[in-house]
Amino acid sequence: IEAHQRGNELMSDQDVKAAFDAIFKSSNENISARFSDKSRVIVQWSHCSASAGVESIAEQLASQLSESAVLVVSGCDGACYEAPVVTVGNVRHVRVAPEDIPDILSNLANVHSQPAAESHPFFSRQTRIALDGCGTLESTHIDDYISNGGYSGLAASLQSAPEQVIEEVKASGLRGRGGAYFPAALKWEAARNVRNTPKYLVVNCEEGEPGIFKDRHLMEGVPHRILEGAMIASYAAGVTEAIIYINAEAEVSAERMGSAI
């Protein structure tokens, strides 16, 4: 990113593309090897499910899974009222208790591979963008994120001029979600036009509004998406250092963001 901000002194667009192609290829190969002919058992572990006893559920699954299955720890998909949730193929087990685990494991061979959330009434009317993958991706596993399209936006951005990135975000209509709905690209453009250095990007994950937990779902479920967005914004705005501010009580969020970094 620094090389591109200094005018491609160190890496050409072709170099960037080749580097990302190698990363994408490696991640896909790693995921294929890890899950080859194995069932993917997903346990949603987040701040909401922690209060419902998900830790003991995850521990029992980890100790009892056979070699034909892989345990994946994801964030919450947003249906917090159903926690703890364990998903195997297209079967979604909700409000799971320790005594349910033998039945879940005994049916591993009978599940299918399509996502379970598609026909769920809570999700059927939703089109997810920022939250896409929450509840299915292994939250801190970078290969899982990359093999599902992660960091492709950063790769595309670094093959464009910062000004082009800003114009694309302007055209998209992307706005802030804090209440004022300020166009994101105008912030980036204003920061880029400031000639003083250094410049900083602050990612505000405080959740200061009463009863708000939206940031925790992103940090716990798709932390790499926050990092990718921060890097794109930094590149476009000419920023060289980002600061991520997390509420001190959001321990799971801080742990997963730290792991992702």
Image (tube, rainbow, N blue to C red):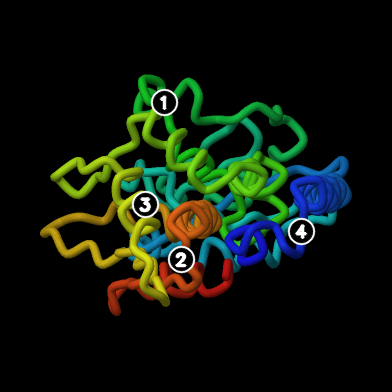
Q: Position of residue 196 (x, y in %)?
A: 36, 72
Which amino acid type corresponds to the residue marked 1 in the rendered image? Thr
CA–CA distance in space, label 4 to label 3: 23 Å
Name the residue rendered at 52%, 57% in the picture. 235
Q: Which residue is mark 3?
A: 188
First along the sequence among labels 4 and 1: 4
Residue 211 x/y as whole percent: 15, 56
Kind of residue indicated by mark 3: Trp
Name the residue beneath numbered marker 1.
127
Give the residue number, with chain letter if any, for mark 4: 11
Q: First in sequence, mark 1 or 2: give its number.
A: 1
Q: In the image, what residue occupies the spot 13% across and 59% down? A: 209
Q: Secondary structure at mark 1?
A: loop
Say the numbered circle drawn on residue 239.
Answer: 2
| Real-space CA distance between mark 2 and mark 3, rounded to the nearest whole angstrom | 9 Å
Q: Amino acid at mark 2?
A: Val
Q: Earlier in the sequence, mark 4 or mark 3?
A: 4
CA gap between label 1 and label 2 equals: 31 Å
